[in-house]
């Protein structure tokens, strides 16, 4: 049986790890290579690196960063942020990443998911979705793009199902409402998406306590939980998270 | 010096990075001379079987020859699958035939690919797992698996709704379906054990 996964997320800006609240008010959390190596060493199951500036200038920096990370990180890691073409995906996979996540570009050109899955296999392709509760349609969420700055009319649950059809191997689902608040994951959102797809869903946004992780897995149906604030600033370490889950009957790699 | 076979299939650098990290001299190469002089050979692989075996080309014979001469050989993922006789991934392909058995699709009725961390039961008599507990988690990412039919092979299994061969050893020939280079500390220990085996055999 596969274990549920604990995945620290490193948002990278100007070669530093940063963390904000609701995608704003960024705070410095350290050096990405150092932090990545520390997580690899202390039992994280995977890592996610997101280039949150994602400009043309930062593109080269992120490839160099991936190479450095790969020299020090001996667990699988995903890279995302501003990726638009299969060539960019190829470059990142060759630099040492196991998976690449796409967000805005997949909304603008859904065929990118299909092309990437055909060329690299769907296990390499992660569809990242930034979700916000819809004000007009209660109980629904809308897809937001461009680092969450632009809401669209697309329904999150429908988009996730379509993403799976197109070839995504995994969904990284971030609740913008919960992000950085440490008030818990949006498990209504997680449940709605995990019920609609057969691929693994990584719950993201809102982790503040160990119980939140458990709830995302049990109530939200998540295969993996992603967190940043609670681990970068050392409220909890990876072992504490896993022991807590193990003691409550969740299979983990401990 | 351990030689990691360079044959243009995906992420081979990660394997070199991991050996370097544990203090082992390693070279990424496809030069016959380097392969002949190596203390051990690693056959990595992130690709479809057919693509990988054709990318290996004439190196296949040489690898077989050095393995049969007793040099330690470690196959990883598709590199492990290539140690067997045949594969049915997108057509029928011949493997190196160093291990008896074939590579077949993971039986339906479960999520495929088998991707993530799974618990492997580690037999006492497999050198690759020296110094590790009785069972450990390793990282898997694959859709096909080996159906081992080799009376002389020792096998470590993982449970994926059936007994999946996670690692095989026959004399100097070793293989892991999982990725030791991406399996954290336990994976690095497996690579270190292979390094120790190579040093021991070179004496």
Image (spheres, rainbow, N blue to C red):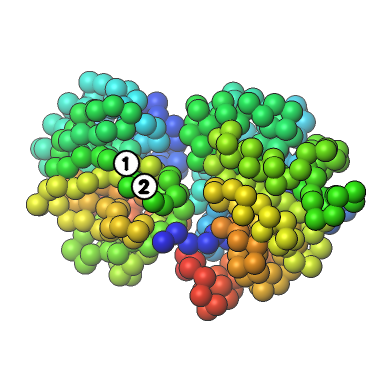
Locate residue B99, reporting x and y percent.
16, 42
Locate residue B155, reporting x and y percent.
21, 56
Contact between labelled residues 1 and 2, with CB atoms less than 8 Å apart: yes
Residue at 25% x, 40% y: name it.
Answer: B103
- Residue furthest to the bottom: A247
**Residue B108 marker:** 2
**In which image quadrant can residue A148 be found?**
top right
* Residue bearing mark 1: B105
* Crowdedness near tag 2: few (<14), some (14–19) or many (≥20) residues, C-alpha within 10 Å: few
* Crowdedness near tag 1: few (<14), some (14–19) or many (≥20) residues, C-alpha within 10 Å: some
Q: Is residue B154 above or below residue A123?
A: below
Residue at 67% x, 29% y: name it.
Answer: A110
Q: Nearer the viewer, residue A126 or A42?
A: A126
Q: Seen in the image, is A76 located left or right of residue A191?
A: left
Q: Is residue B71 visible?
A: no
Q: Is residue A168 visible?
A: yes
- Residue furthest to the right: A136
Q: Chain of mark 2?
A: B
């Amino acid at each position: 049986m596969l274990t549920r996964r604990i995945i620290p997320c490193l948002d990278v800006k100007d070669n530093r790890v940063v963390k904000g609240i609701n995608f704003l008010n960024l705070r410095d959390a350290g050096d990405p290579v150092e932090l990545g190596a520390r997580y690899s060493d202390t039992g994280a199951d995977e890592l996610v690196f997101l280039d949150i500036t994602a400009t043309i200038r930062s593109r080269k920096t992120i490839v160099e960063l991936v190479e450095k990370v790969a020299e020090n990180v001996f667990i699988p890691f995903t890279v995302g942020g501003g990726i638009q073409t299969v060539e960019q995906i190829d470059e990142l996979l060759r630099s040492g990443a196991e998976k690449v996540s796409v967000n805005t570009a997949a909304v603008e050109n859904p065929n990118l998911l299909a092309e990437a899955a055909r060329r690299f296999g769907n296990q390499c392709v992660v569809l990242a979705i930034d979700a916000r509760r819809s004000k007009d349609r209660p109980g629904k969420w809308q897809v937001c793009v461009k680092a969450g700055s632009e809401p669209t009319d697309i329904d999150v649950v429908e988009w996730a199902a379509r993403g799976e059809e197109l070839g995504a191997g995994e969904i990284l689902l971030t609740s913008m409402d919960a992000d950085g608040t440490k008030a818990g994951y949006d498990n209504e959102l997680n449940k709605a998406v995990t019920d609609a797809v057969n691929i693994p869903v990584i719950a993201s946004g809102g982790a503040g306590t160990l119980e939140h992780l458990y709830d995302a897995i049990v109530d939200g149906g998540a295969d993996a939980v992603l967190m940043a604030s609670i681990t970068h600033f050392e409220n909890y370490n990876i072992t504490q998270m896993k022991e807590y889950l193990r003691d409550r009957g969740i299979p983990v790699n401990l | 010096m351990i030689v990691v076979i360079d044959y243009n299939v995906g992420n081979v650098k990660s394997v070199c990075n991991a050996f370097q990290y544990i203090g082992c001299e390693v070279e990424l190469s496809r030069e016959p001379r380097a392969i002949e002089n190596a203390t051990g050979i690693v056959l990595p692989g992130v690709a479809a079987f057919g693509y990988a075996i054709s990318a290996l080309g004439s190196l296949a014979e040489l690898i077989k020859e050095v393995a049969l001469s007793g040099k330690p050989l470690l196959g990883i993922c598709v590199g492990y699958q290539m140690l067997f006789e045949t594969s049915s991934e997108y057509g029928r392909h011949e493997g190196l035939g160093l291990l008896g058995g074939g590579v077949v699709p993971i039986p339906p009725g479960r999520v495929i690919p088998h991707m993530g961390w799974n618990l492997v039961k580690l037999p006492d008599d497999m050198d690759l797992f020296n110094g590790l507990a009785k069972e450990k988690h390793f990282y898997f990412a694959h859709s096909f698996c080996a159906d081992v039919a080799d009376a002389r092979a020792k096998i470590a299994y993982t449970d994926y709704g059936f007994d999946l061969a996670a690692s095989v050893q026959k004399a100097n020939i070793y293989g892991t379906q999982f990725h030791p280079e991406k399996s954290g500390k336990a994976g690095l220990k497996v690579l270190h054990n292979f390094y120790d085996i190579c040093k021991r055999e070179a004496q």
